[in-house]
Amino acid sequence: MARNNNGIKWNRDGFEELRKQPKVREFLKELADEVADDASEGGRVEGYIVTELFLEDPRGAVSVMATGHARRHNNKTYALIKALDAARRGS
């Protein structure tokens, strides 16, 4: 187990196992869907895509990408960064 600056002990094997649990992966997918919806302004801008990264190690990862029109929209407005920040803050 590794110790961080706050004195918390991390069980890395347990953490990796937790990330692979179906409920955690479902939660990550729902959160990514919310980020994509927020970035697309409720579906107004098409092209924000959510992808579950099953083949990545460690598993339990989700990607939100801007393609096509959404890519141009994101370059102008930084919509993905703003949506990720809002999700991080719990808004």
Image (spheres, helix red, strand yellow):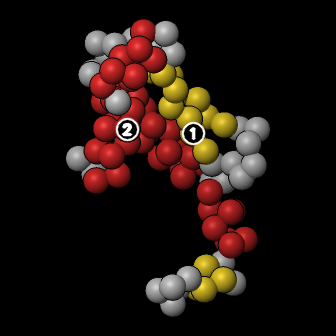
Q: Secondary structure at mark 2?
A: helix
Viewer-proximal residue among 86 and 29: 86
Which residue type carries mark 2? Answer: Ile
Give percent across and percent down for residue 58.
71, 52
Quarter occupied by residue 1: bottom right
69, above or below 75, in the image: above
Q: Disc 2 vs disc 1: Cβ atoms closer than 8 Å?
A: no
Mark 2 = which residue? 81
Q: Secondary structure at mark 1?
A: strand
Q: CA distance from mark 2 to mark 1?
A: 15 Å
The residue at 33%/37% (across/down) is: 83
79, above or below 26, in the image: above
Of all residues, the one furthest to the left in this rendering is: 91
Task: Note whether residue 74 is visible.
Answer: yes
The residue at 61%/45% (across/down) is: 61
Mark 1 = which residue? 62
Q: Callout 2 environment at 10 Å: few (<14), some (14 to 19), or many (20+)?
A: few
